[in-house]
Image: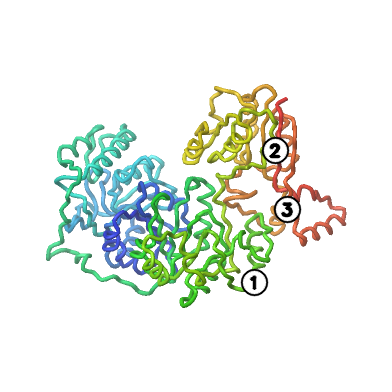
Amino acid sequence: MIDRSLAFVVCASDAEQLQRRLLVSECLQSRRYRLAVYFDSPSAARAFNEEMDHSTGEDWLVWVHQDVFLPDGWDRQFLTALAQADSVIPRLAVVGVYGIDLQGRRAGHVLDRGRLLREPQPLPCEASSLDEVLVAVRTSSRLVLDSELRYHFYATDLVLAARQRGWAAAVVDSCCEHWSDTPTSGSVARTFAEALIADARVFETKWLEHLPLATPCFNIRQPGDVERFVQAHFPVTTDATQAAPPRPNEAGVFPSQADRKPFIRSRPLFEVLLFDGGTLRLSEEFALGQRELRRRIRADRWWHAGPSHRPILPAHFLQFCQADRVLVILDPAVLVADNLIDELLDLTPGGQVACALPADPRTTGTVTVDYASRPGFDRHVARRARLPAAAPYAGQSPWLYMMTLEALRQVVADDSVINWERIPESLGSRTLLAQRTFIHSWSNYQQNTRAEMLDLLPARTSSLLDVGGGEGGFAAAFVERFGGQATVAELNPAAGERAKARGLTVHCGPFEQLPHITSFDCIAFLDVLEHLADPLAALRKAHSLLKPGGHVLLAVPNVGHWSVVQDLLQGEFDYQPVGILCVGHLRFFTRRGLEKLIEDAGFQVARWRDCPSPLPGNFQAFLDQAAAFQQTVDFQSLATDSFHALIKAR
């Protein structure tokens, strides 16, 4: 059972440091707490903020360096120190083991590169600054790191931001060992110095009105102090050769961590390797999807594969995994069945079966795919229980699979540069399909071309604005068919960049802030109106941006669809990453409600299309009985999952 009082997150750039230091800490070796490891993350904020956003009930999220060792019993000491601090410091949200108190004095207790730092200030004490070596944040505070800072000053920035919002920060007495390779004097690598100075400029500018500020490493009285200090005390070289960190002497308080043997109580059943979410990563939908994923996959160790352009290779990953199996999630934008782990574990006990994949809509077999909500998805999975447990793997591109570590070693021995996508097929008949469990991918959420909407456009349409156009799929399809000019208005910067790469004009920001510099023949809102706080205002703005005789193209989900009604009859209304009950939906429409909105915005319907989604037979029979008792039932609405409309400005 995973203890949810703490969860740990670390960025890993040095495999040897991570293995020799943090991963042999007893509280992590015992696997009492969830640990998330991000390989080659571009910033501390990228890793920490994702974990904060995706947390599922942990009390405190602990950020820790890869070169830190946590002595035996550290977690119990830390939790005791947290409770003590909580009892004397109101609204405590940020905690560290070393920092600066409110009077500008150093506080804390840490073994730094063999040198014991034990400051005289009584602990716990309120903090004005914390060292980045180890920082814990109460998850209920929803505090996050500033994404403009890469790997420096983010802990002090967090303390200052917390205090601005009425939270408190503290230093507590829970000593850890820090074995950094960063020199305290002498030359440093140019890349390190440049990154430090760049972060310092961001930090100094942001907190200009709070200067002077003391951090554990710098006294900042005015902008540029950090840069001047680095230039004066750290000669920069192109390829700095750094001396090995000093070792503790004979009288050291703690024994050298490097001499410790790994403490492994029992071999876990599986660990998780999770790949990058791409342009979806910053969305509300993706955050909910990750929380749902973690609720159903209760693993204590999550390895994040690194940036999509250079994920960790299987040969490298073998250095870290200590479990019998690894669950590889190549597509993190997936809904998974509650029975996923049990079914995959049952199929991979070792021996002949080396790898198992769940079924998905491409491999559904004899069970009809008729779900449109999470409860419907669960009912579909329940019907799969009558299928044989396993079937041959047909070679489809894997979204997720579980394999034994022994099989992974054999695969890497045969091909040291094999990628994760090729592994299931490389194992041949030793890979099976787990038919009784199921997953559904929604990773094309921002990539769909929506080409079916083009048929509604007037033939002479020559200019298009696609609001919420994602990566530009629909706009590009319009240009290809109509040969006109297309502009995309998109909130997600990463998706906007991909749209630009297609040669499209992109406005990155809210549609409401789009400058009126040109007019359009058509403006598209494809599954967008329901995401807006004020869809009426959006349509009125669109009205003002249209050329005379212009149109607006709409695609809007129908909340009167049978899947929603059926769930409501069973007491269910669960938001999901995608679908009619998408977590990003702020407004809900039936046909009548949408027609009123169109009229109020100054439009009239030119073309209308209901998108059919037939009722399941058993639910149809139930509603037929209701109709027999003179209960009005709108079967047309129930069998429509969305509305497509071309509307013309009056």
Instruction: Point out the tag, 3 or 1, that comes first from the N-terminus.
Output: 1
Q: Which residue is mark 2?
A: 455
Q: CA distance from mark 3 to mark 1?
A: 27 Å
First-in-chain label (1 vs 2): 1
Please give left or right for residue 575 compared with residue 28 in the image. right
Label 3 element class: helix
Crowdedness near tag 2: few (<14), some (14–19) or many (≥20) residues, C-alpha within 10 Å: few
Picture coordinates of residue 450 (x, y %)?
63, 42
Residue 566 vs 461, above or below: the answer is: below
Q: Secondary structure at mark 1?
A: loop
Q: Is residue 169 above or below residue 248?
A: above
Q: CA distance from mark 1 to mark 2?
A: 41 Å
For the C terminus, the quadrant is top right
- Which residue type carries mark 2? Asp
Callout 2: SS:
helix
Q: Does residue 87 appear in this view?
A: no
Percent of width and height locating residue 223: 26, 32
Query: 522 or 266, which is in the foreground?
Result: 522
Mark 3, Cα crowd under 10 Å, few <14 / some 14-19 / many 20+, is many
Q: Residue at x 84, y 52 (%)?
A: 631
**Mark before the other along the chain sequence, 2 or 3:** 2
For the N terminus, which image quadrant? bottom left
Residue depth check, mark 2 versus mark 3: number of the one nearer the observer? 2
The residue wearing badge 3 is 562
Circles 3, 1 touching at the beta carbon (< 8 Å):
no
Identity, as a three-letter code, of the amino acid under mark 3: Trp
Disc marking residue 387: 1
Q: Nearer the viewer, residue 612 or 510?
A: 612
**Separation of marks 2 and 3 at Cα, in angstroms:** 27 Å
Kind of residue sitting beneath label 1? Leu
